[in-house]
């Protein structure tokens, strides 16, 4: 983005205005579709306005890690597809994609949203692995929040593949068994520019703001993951305001997600 | 031989139901979604833009560069590891060759036009779907083209020639079958992609190449309709 545009976005924000006309604490219109990918055990497409992110869940039988013989394996991966934005390049995972995946992963893992013990079939020998892959189709900022929501919606609607009698997995038949969700972690990224705070930044806004804080919440009171980004420091009061905003936005998202089955 | 029934109930020469849409990715210069049965491809075109490293540049023309990629959850069985594989590199390579004959980039020397093809779900025929999506996306990007490129597979299962094999048929096909992906230029009926897996008799190959033509023309129509729909509706507004 050129310097003039960045300055323009900044100036507008400082007057409390966003280029798309939203209020500072307003999320773009949210749409969640699930069960859209025939080859995935669970899938979701999340739209915030025109921005679009896809998440798919694949499950497999694996040998558990030696240090956690009774736990299934959870993996969250994100890829910034060069298809979705001119700024993404093909090649090895960028730091942005790694950070996105790890922040979303942390929210799901630390909240014990998936009971990994429940994924164990045979101690030390056979556990289910759950791989969640997140990709933007139409990138326009806020990938952590969109990806986190898509991941949860995909996991929420995922069904185990069936097991054959010989112990192999039949991916063509999905069972009625759903993955149990113990929690609903919702990541919300709040950005700060000067004294102002915004949620759901577009790509342009992400480049214009000073700093950001992703706050993953589980309910009206509990935080389960944090990640600060950007080079400008935050004061304690800033963090408090950002946390308040995150709880408010997460509440709105939670209502929409509750209707997804 | 004649009492063979396709698992889907389709006629031998019928492709699966299709959907196509142009202009689905906001930040791309051109884009498309093409779905045939349960195989779905997205394509995005970026460019012409400067090509790096510079020694790859051609002072006479721009270069068409493709990338075919299956998303990790798009495979028939367990998760596909992200990143390029031998398979995806080969498909990328033949996809480029399938599209280059219709594309004229001589107005843009030293540049590259990137086509990114992503498949969120597949049920056989993914390279063909990718080519179909890419051709729509290139047209949507306003790239000078001689014609559309349309692509589908033709194969033989238990001695029957079938158009557009789906996953179930490919499965039946494993030991004795044949799968021939084809891409062609509808107006000249020239073939730009031709591969084959399996065995086929000389006469059957000729038959297969004839049998597949109506399906290819039907696909070309769906591709054109997708562009019509986008641009006609834009004019009305």
Image (cartoon, coloured by chain):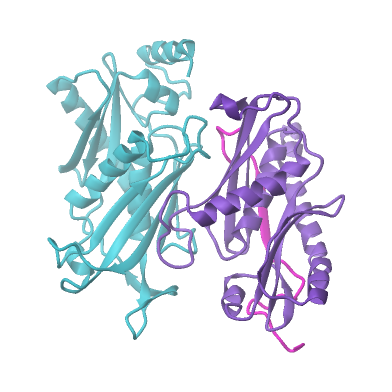
Chain colours: A cyan, B purple
Image coordinates of residue B233 in percent, x first then y, are 73, 38
Q: Is residue B2 magenta?
A: yes
Image coordinates of residue A232 in percent, x first then y, are 24, 18
Q: Is residue B229 above or below residue B219?
A: above
- At x 34%, y 39%, the residue is A144
Left or right? Give the position of A48 relative to B58: left
Left or right? Give the position of B134 relative to B215: left
Q: Is residue A221 above or below residue A240?
A: below
Write down the region rendered in magenta: B1-28
Left or right? Give the position of A39 relative to A199: right
Left or right? Give the position of B205 relative to B45: right
The answer to which of A241 and B51 lies nearer the viewer is: B51
Quadrant assignment for the C terminus of chain A: bottom left
Q: Is residue A45 above or below residue B142?
A: below
Quarter of image, res A79: top left
Q: Is residue A158 magenta?
A: no
The answer to which of A241 and A162 lies nearer the viewer is: A162
Viewer can see residue B119: no
Q: Residue furthest front?
A: B55
- At x 31%, y 47%, the residue is A254
The answer to which of B195 and B76 lies nearer the viewer is: B195
Image coordinates of residue A257 in percent, x first then y, are 35, 51
Q: Main secondary structure of the magenta part?
A: loop
- At x 58%, y 48%, the residue is B42
Image coordinates of residue A98 in percent, x first then y, are 32, 40
The answer to which of A156 and A99 lies nearer the viewer is: A99
Quarter of image, res B55: top right
């Amino acid at each position: 983005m050129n310097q003039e545009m960045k300055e323009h976005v900044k100036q507008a924000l400082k007057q409390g205005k966003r280029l798309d006309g939203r209020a500072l604490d307003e999320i773009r219109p949210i749409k969640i579709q699930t069960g859209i990918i025939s080859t995935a055990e669970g899938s979701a497409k999340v739209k915030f306005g025109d921005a679009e992110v896809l998440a798919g869940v694949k499950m497999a039988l694996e040998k558990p890690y030696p240090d956690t013989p009774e736990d299934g394996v959870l993996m969250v991966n994100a890829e910034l597809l060069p298809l979705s934005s001119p700024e993404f390049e093909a090649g090895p995972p960028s730091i942005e994609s790694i950070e996105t995946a790890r922040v979303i992963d942390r929210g799901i893992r630390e909240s014990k949203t998936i009971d990994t013990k429940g994924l164990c079939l045979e101690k030390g020998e056979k556990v289910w692995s759950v791989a969640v892959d997140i990709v933007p189709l139409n990138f326009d900022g806020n990938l952590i929040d969109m990806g986190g929501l898509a991941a949860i919606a995909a996991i929420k609607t995922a069904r185990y593949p069936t097991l054959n009698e010989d112990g192999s997995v039949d991916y063509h038949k999905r069972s009625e068994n759903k993955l149990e969700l113990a929690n609903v972690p919702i990541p919300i990224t709040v950005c700060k520019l000067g004294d102002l705070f915004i949620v759901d930044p577009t790509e342009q806004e992400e480049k214009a703001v000073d700093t950001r804080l992703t706050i993953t919440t589980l309910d009206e009171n509990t935080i389960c993951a944090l990640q600060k980004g950007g080079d400008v420091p935050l004061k304690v009061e800033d963090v408090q305001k950002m946390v308040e905003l995150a709880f408010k936005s997460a509440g709105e998202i939670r209502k929409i997600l509750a209707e997804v089955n | 031989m004649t009492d063979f029934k396709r698992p889907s109930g389709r006629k031998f020469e019928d492709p699966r139901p299709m959907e196509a849409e142009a202009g689905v990715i906001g930040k791309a210069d051109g884009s498309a979604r093409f779905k045939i049965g349960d195989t779905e491809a997205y394509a995005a075109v970026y460019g012409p833009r400067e090509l790096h490293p510079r020694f790859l540049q051609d002072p006479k023309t721009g270069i068409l560069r493709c990338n075919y990629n299956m998303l990790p959850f798009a495979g028939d069985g367990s998760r596909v590891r992200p990143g390029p594989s031998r398979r995806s590199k080969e498909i990328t390579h033949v996809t480029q060759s399938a599209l280059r004959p219709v594309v004229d980039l001589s107005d843009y020397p030293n540049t590259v036009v990137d086509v990114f093809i992503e498949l969120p779900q597949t049920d056989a025929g993914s390279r063909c779907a990718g080519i179909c999506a890419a051709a729509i996306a290139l047209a949507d990007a306003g790239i000078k083209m001689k014609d559309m490129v349309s692509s589908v597979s033709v194969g033989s299962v238990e001695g029957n020639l079938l158009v557009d094999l789906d996953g179930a048929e490919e499965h039946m096909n494993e030991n004795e079958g044949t799968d021939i992906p084809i891409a062609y230029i509808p107006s000249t009926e020239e073939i730009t992609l031709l591969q084959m897996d399996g065995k086929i008799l000389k006469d059957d190959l000729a038959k297969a190449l004839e049998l597949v033509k109506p399906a290819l023309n039907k696909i070309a129509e769906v591709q054109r309709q997708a562009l019509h729909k986008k641009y006609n509706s834009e004019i009305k507004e």
